[in-house]
Image: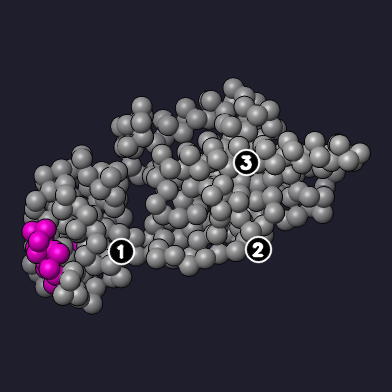
């Protein structure tokens, strides 16, 4: 490594809920820690986050700002930037490259870079995303309860989301869009839930006075709706660093994600992953717990590894 490289005990790649949580416990464990944050949280379009005990309704931006203040109190460094690569340094650690050309060293890595929702290519969906075009009823269902819902079917699981959101509204319309169709069982469940099914491709969303008013179909039909739920057509994990390091991936119903154990440990020694980079269901409250667990495990490993080396007459790495 370059002689001028700054050396840290832990580098956290990603400054969202999981990364800040890992950094908090590592800072409190007196570990010299750096968080490198590209500033691309998955929930950035959302004005409020829900379901986080004591922080329900807080804006994601305010939540992350508060987290950065907390880690700073324990000496953790936070740096705006992008990690472009990492490689073993030959000394039981890693050389981490940043987009600005700097390099830092780390004994351990925590990758919490999240994922990207690739949305259906329907006019208006991306523009209204996180406002009245939604994906998670646990995150947004209460706020739009009892309104007329539309659901644009996911090609692989056309009925699932409509069945889920029917708990929050009795007026739900499922737009099959590009889905091939429904099984007999799916049709029976949708009928039991009172969900109306509309065949035909969705052309776009109608908006008036900055408010969603309905769904336009390609054949000219218009269905009034006040909230539309969509599932991402593909979930793309920001896992470039993990793949570069050779971390094992595994196939899931939502696509390919890095394989981790219960502490977030990957197949690469010294590398952990937490949050949405490990799967799409790790909402803020889950990501915080996973980051904390990774931080505790890393500190424990470093502590006992150094003690064992010292007891055996060697030096810590």
Instruction: Return the residue at label 2.
Output: 246
Of helix, strand and loop, which one carries label 3?
A: helix
Q: Position of residue 110 (x, y in %)?
A: 61, 46
Q: Earlier in the sequence, mark 2 or mark 3?
A: 2
Horizontal side of 119 relative to 71 (left or right) equals left
Q: Position of residue 25 (x, y in %)?
A: 58, 32
Residue at left offset 16%, top offset 57%: 150
Q: Callout 3: few (<14), some (14-19), or many (20+) C-alpha neighbours within 10 Å?
A: some
Foreground: 299 or 236? 299
Q: Earlier in the sequence, mark 1 or mark 3?
A: 1
In the image, is residue 5 above or below residue 252?
A: above
Question: Are the two marked residues, 2 and 3, in contact with CB atoms closer than 8 angstroms?
Answer: no
Q: Give the quadrant of residue 296.
A: top right
Instruction: Return the residue at label 3.
Output: 297
Residue 214, visible in the rendered structure: no
Foreground: 178 or 24? 24
Residue 268, visible in the rendered structure: yes
Question: Mark 1 and mark 2: span between their CA atoms?
Answer: 31 Å
Of helix, strand and loop, which one carries label 1?
A: loop
Question: Are the two marked residues, 1 and 2, in contact with CB atoms closer than 8 angstroms?
Answer: no
Quadrant where the image shows the C terminus: top right
Q: Give the quadrant of residue 121.
A: bottom left
The mark lying in front, picked from 1 and 3, is 3
Q: Callout 2: few (<14), some (14-19), or many (20+) C-alpha neighbours within 10 Å?
A: few
Instruction: Return the residue at label 1.
Output: 120
Tally of numbered tags: 3
Horizontal side of 41 relative to 143 (left or right) equals right
Magenta region: which residues? 187-204
Residue found at the very far bottom of the displayed protein: 180
Residue at left offset 57%, top offset 31%: 24
């Amino acid at each position: 490594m370059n002689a001028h490289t700054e050396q840290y005990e832990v580098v956290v790649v990603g400054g969202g809920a999981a990364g800040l949580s890992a950094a908090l416990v590592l800072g409190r464990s007196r570990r010299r820690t750096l968080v490198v944050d590209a500033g691309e949280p998955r929930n950035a379009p959302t004005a409020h986050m829900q379901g986080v005990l004591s922080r329900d309704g807080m804006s994601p931006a305010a939540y992350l700002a508060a987290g950065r203040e907390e880690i700073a109190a324990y000496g953790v460094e936070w740096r705006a930037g992008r990690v472009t690569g990492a490689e073993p340094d030959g000394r039981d650690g890693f050389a981490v490259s940043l987009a600005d050309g700097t390099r830092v060293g780390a004994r351990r890595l925590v990758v919490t870079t999240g994922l990207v929702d690739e949305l259906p290519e329907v006019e208006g969906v991306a523009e209204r995303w996180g406002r009245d075009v939604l994906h998670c009823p646990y995150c947004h269902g209460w706020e739009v309860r009892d309104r007329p819902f539309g659901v644009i079917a996911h090609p692989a699981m056309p009925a699932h989301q409509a069945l889920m959101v029917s708990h929050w509204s009795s007026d739900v319309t499922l737009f099959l869009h590009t889905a091939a169709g429904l099984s007999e069982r799916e049709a029976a469940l949708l009928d039991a839930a009172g969900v109306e099914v509309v065949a035909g491709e969705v052309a776009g969303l109608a908006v008036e006075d900055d408010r969603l008013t309905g769904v336009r179909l390609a054949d000219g039909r218009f269905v009034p709706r006040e909230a539309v739920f969509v599932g991402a057509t593909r979930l793309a994990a920001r896992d470039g660093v993990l793949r570069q390091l050779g971390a094992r991936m595994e196939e899931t119903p939502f696509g390919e994600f890095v394989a981790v154990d219960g502490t977030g440990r990957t197949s690469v020694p010294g590398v952990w992953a937490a949050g949405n980079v490990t799967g799409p269901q790790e909402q803020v409250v889950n990501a915080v717990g996973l980051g904390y667990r990774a931080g505790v495990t890393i500190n424990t490993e470093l502590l006992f590894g150094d003690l064992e080396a010292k007891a055996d007459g060697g030096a810590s790495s």
